[in-house]
Amino acid sequence: MHEKDFILLEGRSITLPELGREIEHITGREIKDSTGEIKRVIAHLPNFESDTDTFVATYKLNHRNDFIDATFTAPKSERGRLKEVAVNVELISYISRA
């Protein structure tokens, strides 16, 4: 639905509140939480040598059942500050529950 615009955000380094504002701009809808609901992605085979972890922020849209998942990586050392630091956006997906 908004894939062409989402692609422009993928690969960028951005804070989660900034990403939330970009999502609002692209979709024309307000989101419920500026940073989304954050969950860590657990790999089947952990890479202990990597300096980053992978997470998914789920942004729920007001007035609809639709939501946006933003997969991103962040330094392991910043795990406690994900809502404040710039993260690297890997993939953005629009999920419709219509």
Image (cartoon, grey):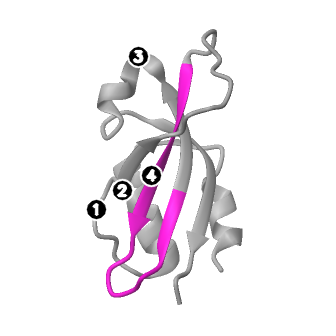
Q: How far is the residue under mark 1 from the one under mark 2?
A: 5 Å
Q: Residues within 10 Å of mark 3 (few under 14, many from 20)?
A: few
Q: How far is the residue under mark 4 from the one under mark 1?
A: 10 Å
Instruction: Answer whether labels 1 and 2 touch (C-beta < 8 Å).
Output: yes
For residue 79, side relative to residue 50 (left or right): left
> Which residue sits at x=30%, y=36%?
84
Instruction: Answer whether labels 2 and 3 touch (C-beta < 8 Å).
Output: no
Q: Secondary structure at mark 4?
A: strand
Q: Earlier in the sequence, mark 4 or mark 2?
A: 2
Q: Residues within 10 Å of mark 4 (few under 14, many from 20)?
A: many
Report the residue marked by disc 4.
57
Magenta run includes residue 22: no
Residue type beneath disc 3: Ser
Q: Which residues are magenta?
A: 52-69
Residue type beneath disc 4: Ala
Residue 67 % position (x, y): 47, 71
Instruction: Answer whether labels 4 and 2 touch (C-beta < 8 Å).
Output: yes
Q: Secondary structure at mark 1?
A: loop
Q: How far is the residue under mark 3 from the one under mark 1?
A: 24 Å
Majority SS type along the magenta span:
strand
Q: How far is the residue under mark 2 from the one under mark 3?
A: 20 Å
Location of residue 37 by image quarter: bottom left
Report the residue marked by disc 1.
33
Q: Secondary structure at mark 2?
A: loop
